[in-house]
Image (cartoon, helix red, strand yellow):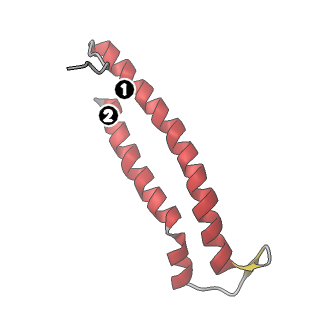
């Protein structure tokens, strides 16, 4: 059961991280700045970069950590003698 609790907490934290990174453009529209990055205004380029690369990196991290948690769940189920196979009805 410990791995299941870890998976629920991980899901909640990753959901919050995806929402934050995906909507970082709203933060820059609330607090505008007059800085430049790569020749573009910061309030335009940072939300685009965070939207593309931030979500991409979070997806990779979520996949790797999620697979580890799934392995922990399988090992806990094997220790308890619970089958994780799906049976046809």
Mark 1–mark 2 contact, CB under 8 Å?
A: yes
In the image shown, does 56 or 68 lie closer to the viewer? 56
Q: What element carries label 2?
A: helix
Quadrant in the picture for the C terminus: top left
Mark 1, Cα crowd under 10 Å, few <14 / some 14-19 / many 20+, is: some
The quadrant holding residue 61 is top right
Task: Say left or right for 46 vs 74.
Answer: right
Residue 48 percent across, percent down from the top left? 63, 69
Picture residue at 55% right of the left edge, 50% below the top: 58
Q: Quadrant of residue 84?
A: top left
Q: What element carries label 1?
A: helix
- With respect to residue 78, does 11 lie above or below? below
Please tell me the numbered disc located at residue 4. Answer: 2
Q: Where is residue 31 in the image (x, y as percent from the top left)?
A: 55, 84
Which disc, if any, is residue 48? Answer: none
Q: Residue at x 40, y 44 (%)?
A: 10
Q: Which residue lies furthest to the front in this view?
A: 89
- How many marks do you count on the picture? 2
Quadrant in the picture for residue 83: top left
The residue at the far right in this view is 39
Residue 86, compared with residue 55, is above or below; it is above
First in sequence: mark 1 or mark 2? 2
Q: Residues within 10 Å of mark 2 (few under 14, many from 20)?
A: some
Q: Distance between the residues labelled 1 and 2?
A: 7 Å
Q: In this view, does 22 lie above or below 11?
A: below
Please state the horizontal and vertical placement of residue 26, each as a whole percent of the image.
Answer: 50, 77
Quarter of the image that includes the N terminus: top left
Residue lying at 80% horizontally and 78% vertically, measured from the top left: 39
Q: Mark 1 points at which residue?
A: 73
């Amino acid at each position: 059961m410990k791995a299941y609790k870890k998976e629920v907490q991980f899901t909640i934290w990753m959901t919050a991280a995806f929402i934050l990174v995906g909507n970082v453009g709203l933060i820059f529209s609330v607090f505008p700045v007059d800085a430049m990055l790569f020749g573009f205004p910061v309030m335009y380029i940072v939300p685009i970069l965070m939207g593309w690369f931030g979500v991409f990196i979070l997806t990779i991290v979520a996949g790797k950590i999620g697979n580890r948690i799934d392995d922990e769940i399988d090992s806990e189920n094997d220790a308890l003698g619970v089958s994780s196979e799906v049976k046809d009805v």
